Amino acid sequence: MSSTRLLGKRALITGASSGIGRAIAIRFAREGASVAINYRSQPDEAEITRQHAVAAAQEAGHKDFKAIVIGADVADEAQIKKMFEEAISGLGGIDILINNAGIQKCAESDQIDIADYDRVMNVNLRGTFICAREALRHFLAREYKGVIVNNSSVHEIIPKPLYLPYSISKGGMENLTRTLGLEYAGRGIRVNAVGPGAIVTPINNAWINDTGKSAEVCSHIPMGRPGGADEIAGVFAFLASDEASYITGQTLFACGGLTLFPEFRTGWSS
Ligand code: NAD
């Protein structure tokens, strides 16, 4: 799919060395944005993302395109600040922040190790906030009508037993998105989120590589299949673009119907 709706924009994407973040970087490049590709621990994978982004931009015929790679742990405020400095100097500014980095850890809630709890919250929610704050400071200082899009989840609204910190972090992301959306709407800055369902990325290797588990996952999804990372990247591109110029504070669920109470498909309750 080709479009130039992000032409000339500059985007920083966290956690872009794999999965949805990689797909966003490539999609944004194809749609005309320059991209800063953040990674935490896999520089080689981030470089692969960069090469794909460059190829996508070239294929689409975009000239003044830049793609840079920046290492930083979004759980660390000092590293986030340095990442913003590098992204702003490397791209000449940032118009779009994509808060994509996220992790999950599985445990029964009565057995959760507090270090695991803190790590998930620090990456998924605290990191998202600090990145958003840095982006807002940059937008306000330069009077940019910037855009922030957070990668949330269907678990923003659907409880996820065995993944309590993940559930809490994505639930918190709803009010992070709504509050920032409201607070900065008057200054032309939009803040939205995407809520993916079950998407084929490394975070889901536990069921992707297991035929039986994959079939079970599909059986719970009204559309009968998991989503592709590029299907989610397209939603990010829409929300980051001027096509979404009147949308702020919203989470757009892209989940094959998972948020529609699938258990009620058969009308068993009446
Ligand atoms: P993924 O594991 O491929 O991607 C997560 C990315 O975040 C990785 O590149 C990882 O290196 C990066 N990351 C982790 N900790 C980091 C840190 N401290 N600093 C910087 N980067 C860090 O999985 P994904 O599915 O592409 O996940 C991306 C986002 O999508 C996550 O926020 C996840 O919660 C969300 N999401 C995924 C699904 C799904 O089914 N795949 C569904 C809903 C939401």
Image (spheres, helix red, strand yellow):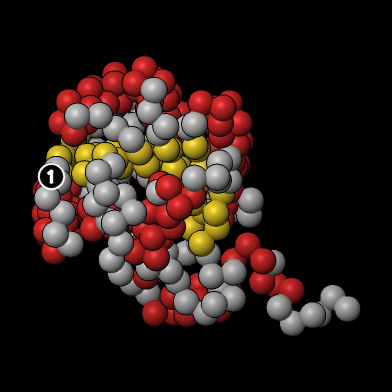
Write the residue at 29% across / 21% down: 81
- The quarter of the picture where residue 227 lies is bottom left
The CB of the residue at mark 1 lies under 8 Å from ligand 1: no
Q: Residue furthest right?
A: 270
Write the residue at 37% across / 42% down: 98
Quadrant containing the C terminus in the rendered view: bottom right
Q: Percent from the top left, x then y, of residue 186?
A: 56, 27
Residue 136 visible to an observer of this rendering = yes
Q: Percent from the top left, x then y, of residue 126?
A: 46, 29
Q: Percent from the top left, x then y, of residue 177?
A: 55, 37
Write the residue at 49% across / 31% down: 188
Quadrant containing the N terminus in the rendered view: bottom left
Residue 134 visible to an observer of this rendering = no
In the picture of the structure, the residue carrying the numbered disc 1 is: 64
Where is 67 relative to 226, above or below? above
Q: Is residue 98 left or right of residue 155?
A: left
Q: Dot 1 lies on which element?
A: loop
Write the residue at 14% across / 46% down: 65
In the image, what residue type sits under mark 1? Answer: Asp
Q: Percent from the top left, x then y, of residue 63?
A: 12, 50
Where is 38 relative to 201, above or below? above
Q: Depth check: give the residue in front, 16 or 231.
A: 231
Q: Is residue 61 left or right of residue 206?
A: left
- The quarter of the picture where residue 30 lies is bottom left
Q: Is residue 53 left or right of residue 179?
A: left
Q: Residues within 10 Å of mark 1 (few under 14, many from 20)?
A: few
Q: Depth check: give the residue in front, 3 or 88.
A: 3
Where is 172 relative to 228, above or below? above
